[in-house]
Amino acid sequence: MTKIDNRSTEQPLPPEVSIGSDSWLTRARNYPVFSRTWYYYRSLAWLIPLVVIDLLILVITTLLSLPLSKVLPVMLPISIGVSALYLTGPGLAVLVRQLQFVEKKEAIYLTLALVFGGLLSYGIYQLSDYFCDWVSSEKKVHGSFEFAAKFEGHDSPASKELESGINSFHSVKPKPQVSTASAAASSDEQTAKEANQNINQFLTPVVNGFVDTLIVISLGGGFDLWLFFRQKKRLLEDQRLRELKQAQEARREAELRLSVLVAQVEPHFLFNTLAGVRSAINTEPVRATAIVDHLVDYLRATIPKFRSDGSSSQARLQQQLDAARAYLNLMQARIPRLNFSIESEIADAALPPLMLISLVENAIKHGVEPKIGPAHIAINARELVLDKQSLLELSVADDGVGFGGTTSGSGIGLENIRERLASMYGDAASLTLKANPEGGVTAIICLPLEK
């Protein structure tokens, strides 16, 4: 059992989990539940409307010339009690979250914090209500003492007349004459009223208790606790999806690196190269030496790259141009009818590994080798500005057999390049193929320029 890592709890939620709202009323939903930032925006979403409503009540009370002694004893306990209910429990839950308990203990302590906060806020509400009632009763008692003092010790004629009237009212009490039938009806009616009163006395506390429970749960953090567990589940699902996506990207990267490596050092490649060396030793020793030198240069330029992790930060344009030049020199030594040119308007830039060499090998295999006669491959790198964004445009053009030959531009290698570009740059990068007017195909990679 490990502790919860809360170092990133104050960071906004990922787009897959966040509601993406900029409104101050719902901005708290953009952050992890029971984080400090979440609590800050949640408190603002409650306190600002509460202050505005209280001020409006006071203004209306003043305009209508109503006594504040009758409004404040009702308004203050409700405002203080509900605010305490809304802030206390979640505030304690925030403190629990910062202590970084293990997962199961954290869930238990969060629940206890919300329950304790609800009880504490209820006590705060009762104290504020008791205080307001005490202040109000003090004013009433003081006013009754003043009223009684006006008559105490005074034997005025008016008071005597009032006292005699009251005594005569109590002394004369007429006795109503009720028949037996009406008495029975009154008895049945009284029994029905008592039954209804008993039902109301039973249902009223139940309904009030149910409503109060819903209010306490919703305002006191019960709904937030449900959101916490739901948000946590969605974060775990999002993390699994991210890990799965990374694993798939790593797998595609490894498959591409393996396929390129196999294509570069597979037996028939070495056998053909060595066979060319053997046939040229006696008749063309200079050419044989050149083939061996180009093979060494090519392997030296490419093999160390496979020991890296394949990240774009470790792959540079000039490195891949050098590897492509070494590969084309070797292929030119093997296929004398092949010519090539490499031009770059950019000193250097970041380029995902193995993409350029894959396009060059594709041009050799599907364009140059099937063609009869001279063939040419041109590699060009330049900066392209599109919609005020600098892009790296890398093209590999051949004058081979084109789309009418052995490929239609939908091979596994090209599809891997498209998937890697989409996973790394999204819609900002692309791989396109187009037929050349003079024959052959041009493959163009376009991606954000990062020098």
Image (cartoon, rainbow, N blue to C red):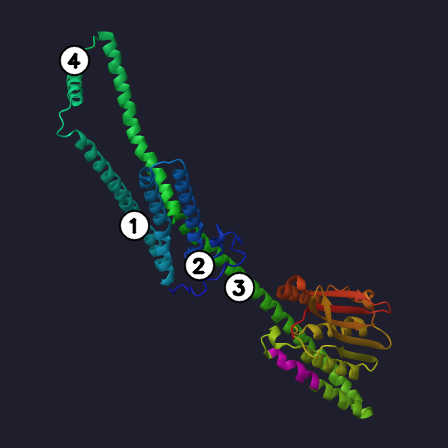
Residue position marked by numbered label 2 in the rendering? 37
Task: Name the amino acid, label 1.
Answer: Leu
Q: Which residue is mark 1?
A: 120
Q: In the image, is 198 to the left or to the right of 279?
A: left
Query: Is 95 or 84 nearer to us in this picture?
Result: 84
The amino acid marked with disc number 4 is Val
Cα separation, mark 2 vs mark 3, equals: 27 Å
Judged from the image, the secondary structure of the residue bearing numbered disc 4 is loop
| Range of magenta residues | 297-306
Tell which circle, 2 or 1, labels the residue nearer the N-terminal end: 2
Q: Which mark is residue 243?
A: 3
At x 76% / y 83%, what residue is drawn?
A: 329
Element at label 1: helix
Residue 209 magenta-drawn? no
Name the mark nearer the viewer: 2 or 4.
Answer: 4
Marks 4 and 1, how far apart at CA = 56 Å
Q: Which label belongs to residue 172?
A: 4
* Label 2 vs 4, first from the N-terminus: 2
Please name which of the two marks, 3 or 4, marks the residue nearer to the observer.
4
x and y percentages locating residue 293 in the rendered image: 73, 88
Residue 123: image x %, image y %?
28, 47
Q: CA distance from mark 1 to mark 3?
A: 43 Å
Which one is in front in this view, the residue at disc 4 or the one at disc 1? 4
**Element at label 3:** helix
Q: CA distance from mark 2 to mark 1?
A: 23 Å
Q: Amino acid at mark 3?
A: Glu
